[in-house]
Image: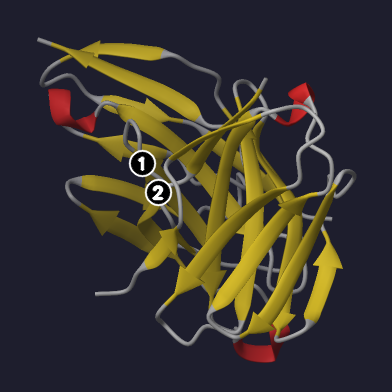
Protein backbone atom coordinates (compact mmCIF):
# COMPACT_ATOMS: atom_id res chain seq x y z
CA UNK A 1 0.00 0.00 0.00
CA UNK A 2 0.86 3.66 -0.07
CA UNK A 3 3.43 4.90 2.42
CA UNK A 4 5.30 8.07 3.30
CA UNK A 5 8.68 8.72 4.89
CA UNK A 6 9.64 12.08 6.32
CA UNK A 7 12.79 13.32 7.97
CA UNK A 8 13.13 12.92 11.68
CA UNK A 9 13.31 15.88 13.96
CA UNK A 10 13.58 17.95 15.88
CA UNK A 11 14.74 20.59 13.45
CA UNK A 12 15.98 23.72 15.19
CA UNK A 13 16.41 26.94 13.20
CA UNK A 14 16.99 30.58 13.88
CA UNK A 15 14.30 33.05 12.89
CA UNK A 16 14.48 34.04 9.19
CA UNK A 17 16.37 30.85 8.25
CA UNK A 18 15.39 28.71 5.26
CA UNK A 19 13.40 25.58 6.02
CA UNK A 20 13.27 22.24 4.21
CA UNK A 21 11.47 19.21 5.60
CA UNK A 22 11.91 16.18 3.39
CA UNK A 23 9.07 13.85 2.48
CA UNK A 24 9.20 10.91 0.06
CA UNK A 25 6.38 8.61 -0.81
CA UNK A 26 5.52 5.24 -2.32
CA UNK A 27 2.19 5.10 -4.08
CA UNK A 28 0.12 3.45 -6.74
CA UNK A 29 -0.80 6.01 -9.36
CA UNK A 30 -0.64 9.71 -8.61
CA UNK A 31 -2.63 10.47 -5.50
CA UNK A 32 -3.03 13.86 -3.88
CA UNK A 33 -0.32 14.77 -1.37
CA UNK A 34 -0.77 16.79 1.80
CA UNK A 35 1.15 18.64 4.47
CA UNK A 36 -0.50 19.10 7.84
CA UNK A 37 0.69 21.24 10.76
CA UNK A 38 0.05 20.69 14.46
CA UNK A 39 0.63 23.65 16.76
CA UNK A 40 1.23 22.95 20.46
CA UNK A 41 -1.89 21.75 22.22
CA UNK A 42 -3.97 21.59 19.05
CA UNK A 43 -5.13 19.08 16.47
CA UNK A 44 -3.80 18.87 12.91
CA UNK A 45 -4.62 21.51 10.32
CA UNK A 46 -4.26 21.17 6.59
CA UNK A 47 -1.34 23.38 5.54
CA UNK A 48 -1.26 22.73 1.80
CA UNK A 49 -1.92 20.10 -0.80
CA UNK A 50 -1.10 19.19 -4.39
CA UNK A 51 -3.39 17.07 -6.52
CA UNK A 52 -1.20 16.06 -9.46
CA UNK A 53 2.40 15.80 -10.61
CA UNK A 54 4.30 19.11 -10.90
CA UNK A 55 1.62 20.92 -8.88
CA UNK A 56 2.90 23.33 -6.26
CA UNK A 57 0.87 23.74 -3.10
CA UNK A 58 1.38 26.90 -1.07
CA UNK A 59 0.02 28.55 2.05
CA UNK A 60 1.31 30.94 4.74
CA UNK A 61 4.68 31.22 2.94
CA UNK A 62 5.15 27.44 2.82
CA UNK A 63 5.50 25.60 -0.49
CA UNK A 64 5.78 22.01 -1.66
CA UNK A 65 6.07 20.66 -5.19
CA UNK A 66 4.72 17.27 -6.24
CA UNK A 67 7.67 15.60 -7.97
CA UNK A 68 6.88 12.19 -9.46
CA UNK A 69 10.43 11.66 -10.79
CA UNK A 70 11.85 11.66 -7.28
CA UNK A 71 8.58 10.65 -5.52
CA UNK A 72 9.04 13.60 -3.20
CA UNK A 73 6.95 16.39 -1.69
CA UNK A 74 9.43 18.42 0.34
CA UNK A 75 8.11 21.29 2.45
CA UNK A 76 9.98 24.62 2.16
CA UNK A 77 9.75 28.12 3.58
CA UNK A 78 12.13 30.94 2.77
CA UNK A 79 12.11 32.68 6.16
CA UNK A 80 10.72 30.97 9.23
CA UNK A 81 9.25 32.71 12.25
CA UNK A 82 8.99 31.69 15.88
CA UNK A 83 5.25 31.21 15.29
CA UNK A 84 6.05 28.42 12.79
CA UNK A 85 7.23 26.19 15.64
CA UNK A 86 5.04 23.12 15.34
CA UNK A 87 5.00 19.50 14.19
CA UNK A 88 4.63 18.96 10.45
CA UNK A 89 3.12 15.82 8.90
CA UNK A 90 3.30 14.65 5.32
CA UNK A 91 0.32 12.51 4.19
CA UNK A 92 -1.21 10.73 1.22
CA UNK A 93 -4.27 8.52 0.60
CA UNK A 94 -3.91 5.11 2.19
CA UNK A 95 -6.76 3.23 0.53
CA UNK A 96 -10.49 3.85 0.62
CA UNK A 97 -11.03 7.25 2.17
CA UNK A 98 -8.15 6.94 4.63
CA UNK A 99 -4.96 8.96 4.82
CA UNK A 100 -1.52 7.60 5.67
CA UNK A 101 0.59 10.01 7.72
CA UNK A 102 4.33 10.29 8.23
CA UNK A 103 5.67 10.20 11.77
CA UNK A 104 5.92 13.98 11.94
CA UNK A 105 8.83 16.41 12.10
CA UNK A 106 9.07 18.83 14.99
CA UNK A 107 10.29 22.31 14.08
CA UNK A 108 11.63 24.70 16.69
CA UNK A 109 12.38 28.27 15.66
CA UNK A 110 14.46 30.39 18.00
CA UNK A 111 15.05 34.14 18.12
CA UNK B 1 -16.16 27.74 9.53
CA UNK B 2 -15.85 23.98 9.61
CA UNK B 3 -15.55 22.40 13.02
CA UNK B 4 -14.77 19.08 14.63
CA UNK B 5 -15.41 19.16 18.36
CA UNK B 6 -14.08 16.66 20.86
CA UNK B 7 -15.93 16.62 24.14
CA UNK B 8 -12.92 16.83 26.45
CA UNK B 9 -9.43 18.29 26.14
CA UNK B 10 -8.11 16.42 29.15
CA UNK B 11 -9.44 13.29 30.81
CA UNK B 12 -8.16 11.18 33.69
CA UNK B 13 -9.59 7.71 34.27
CA UNK B 14 -8.69 4.62 36.24
CA UNK B 15 -7.62 1.20 35.02
CA UNK B 16 -10.60 -1.01 34.21
CA UNK B 17 -13.06 1.84 33.68
CA UNK B 18 -15.18 2.09 30.55
CA UNK B 19 -14.25 5.33 28.82
CA UNK B 20 -16.20 7.23 26.20
CA UNK B 21 -14.62 9.84 23.92
CA UNK B 22 -17.08 11.86 21.88
CA UNK B 23 -16.60 13.67 18.60
CA UNK B 24 -19.05 15.83 16.66
CA UNK B 25 -18.62 17.42 13.23
CA UNK B 26 -20.81 20.08 11.66
CA UNK B 27 -19.75 19.65 8.02
CA UNK B 28 -22.11 16.81 7.02
CA UNK B 29 -19.09 14.64 6.25
CA UNK B 30 -19.59 10.97 5.51
CA UNK B 31 -16.23 9.79 6.87
CA UNK B 32 -15.07 10.00 10.46
CA UNK B 33 -11.86 8.72 12.03
CA UNK B 34 -10.25 8.08 15.40
CA UNK B 35 -6.49 8.20 15.78
CA UNK B 36 -4.10 8.00 18.65
CA UNK B 37 -0.90 10.01 18.65
CA UNK B 38 2.17 8.92 20.57
CA UNK B 39 5.70 10.36 20.56
CA UNK B 40 7.83 8.80 17.85
CA UNK B 41 4.91 6.84 16.38
CA UNK B 42 2.99 9.58 14.63
CA UNK B 43 -0.73 9.07 14.05
CA UNK B 44 -2.15 5.57 14.11
CA UNK B 45 -5.67 4.86 12.92
CA UNK B 46 -7.87 3.04 15.44
CA UNK B 47 -11.24 2.91 13.66
CA UNK B 48 -13.05 4.76 10.96
CA UNK B 49 -16.61 5.03 9.72
CA UNK B 50 -17.85 5.89 6.24
CA UNK B 51 -21.55 6.02 7.06
CA UNK B 52 -24.01 5.84 9.92
CA UNK B 53 -23.76 2.49 11.72
CA UNK B 54 -20.84 1.49 9.50
CA UNK B 55 -17.34 1.01 10.88
CA UNK B 56 -14.04 -0.52 9.88
CA UNK B 57 -10.99 -1.41 11.90
CA UNK B 58 -7.88 0.64 11.44
CA UNK B 59 -4.35 -0.37 12.28
CA UNK B 60 -4.69 -0.70 16.07
CA UNK B 61 -8.32 -1.56 16.99
CA UNK B 62 -7.54 -3.88 19.90
CA UNK B 63 -9.06 -2.69 23.17
CA UNK B 64 -11.33 -0.16 21.43
CA UNK B 65 -14.78 -0.05 19.92
CA UNK B 66 -16.76 2.71 18.20
CA UNK B 67 -20.31 3.84 17.71
CA UNK B 68 -21.86 5.96 14.99
CA UNK B 69 -25.60 6.28 15.50
CA UNK B 70 -25.85 9.70 13.83
CA UNK B 71 -23.93 11.12 10.91
CA UNK B 72 -22.41 13.97 12.89
CA UNK B 73 -21.27 11.97 15.92
CA UNK B 74 -18.56 9.32 16.28
CA UNK B 75 -17.74 7.84 19.67
CA UNK B 76 -14.64 5.94 20.72
CA UNK B 77 -15.05 3.48 23.57
CA UNK B 78 -12.34 1.96 25.71
CA UNK B 79 -14.08 -1.13 27.03
CA UNK B 80 -11.72 -1.62 29.98
CA UNK B 81 -9.10 1.09 30.13
CA UNK B 82 -5.47 0.12 30.61
CA UNK B 83 -2.38 2.22 31.26
CA UNK B 84 -1.02 1.55 27.76
CA UNK B 85 -4.00 3.47 26.39
CA UNK B 86 -2.71 6.69 27.90
CA UNK B 87 -2.32 8.87 24.82
CA UNK B 88 -3.55 11.80 22.76
CA UNK B 89 -6.70 10.87 20.83
CA UNK B 90 -7.61 12.77 17.68
CA UNK B 91 -10.90 12.71 15.81
CA UNK B 92 -11.18 13.72 12.17
CA UNK B 93 -13.77 13.88 9.41
CA UNK B 94 -13.73 14.13 5.64
CA UNK B 95 -16.18 14.08 2.74
CA UNK B 96 -16.27 11.18 0.32
CA UNK B 97 -13.74 11.65 -2.45
CA UNK B 98 -14.34 11.00 -6.12
CA UNK B 99 -14.19 7.32 -7.04
CA UNK B 100 -13.76 6.46 -3.36
CA UNK B 101 -10.14 7.54 -3.42
CA UNK B 102 -8.97 9.37 -0.31
CA UNK B 103 -8.01 12.58 -2.05
CA UNK B 104 -10.04 14.68 0.33
CA UNK B 105 -8.28 16.36 3.27
CA UNK B 106 -9.33 15.47 6.77
CA UNK B 107 -10.44 18.03 9.36
CA UNK B 108 -9.28 17.44 12.90
CA UNK B 109 -10.51 18.26 16.37
CA UNK B 110 -8.16 19.64 19.02
CA UNK B 111 -7.61 16.24 20.60
CA UNK B 112 -8.29 14.62 23.96
CA UNK B 113 -5.31 13.93 26.17
CA UNK B 114 -6.31 10.81 28.09
CA UNK B 115 -4.45 9.55 31.14
CA UNK B 116 -5.20 6.12 32.58
CA UNK B 117 -3.99 5.70 36.16
Q: Quadrant of the N terminus of chain B?
A: bottom left
What label does residue B110 carry, if any?
A: 2
| Secondary structure category for the residue under label 2 | loop
Chain that bears disc 1: A
Q: Which mark is residue B58?
A: none
- Could you tell whether B101 is left or right of B95 in the image? right
Task: Give how far across and how far down residue B23 sits, in percent.
Answer: 53, 63
Identity of the residue drawn at 46% across and 57% down:
B6
Q: How far is disc 2 from disc 1 in space, using C-alphas?
A: 5 Å
Which residue shows up at 61% across the image and 51% down it? A69
Letter of the chain that mark 2 sits on in the rendering:
B
B36 on left or right of A9: right
Residue B33 in view: yes
Q: The C terminus of chain B lies in which quarter of the figure? A: top right
Q: Position of residue B18 (x, y in %)?
A: 76, 46
Asked if B101 appears above or below B13 in the picture, the reply is below
Q: Is residue A76 above or below residue B71?
A: above
* Tag 1 secondary structure: loop
Q: Which residue is more in the foreground, A89 or B79?
A: B79
Q: What percent of the width, then of the height, locates residue B78?
A: 77, 47
Residue A99: quadrant of the picture:
bottom right
Task: Using residue A81 as the reference point, say whether residue A109 is left or right of it.
Answer: right
Q: Is residue B25 left or right of residue B1?
A: right
Q: Residue at x 60, y 53 (%)?
A: B21
Q: Are marks 2 and 1 in contact (CB under 8 Å)?
A: yes
Q: In this figure, which colouring scheme has been used for the structure?
A: secondary structure
Q: Quadrant of residue B77?
A: bottom right
Q: Which residue is mark 1?
A: A42
Counting labels gives 2
Q: Nearer the viewer, residue A23 or B115?
A: B115
Amino acid sequence: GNSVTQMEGPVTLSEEAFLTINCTYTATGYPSLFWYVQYPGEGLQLLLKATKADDKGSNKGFEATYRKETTSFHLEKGSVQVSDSAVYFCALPGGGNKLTFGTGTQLKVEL
Amino acid sequence: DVKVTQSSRYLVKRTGEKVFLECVQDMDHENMFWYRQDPGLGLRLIYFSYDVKMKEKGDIPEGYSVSREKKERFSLILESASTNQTSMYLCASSPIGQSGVGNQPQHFGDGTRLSIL
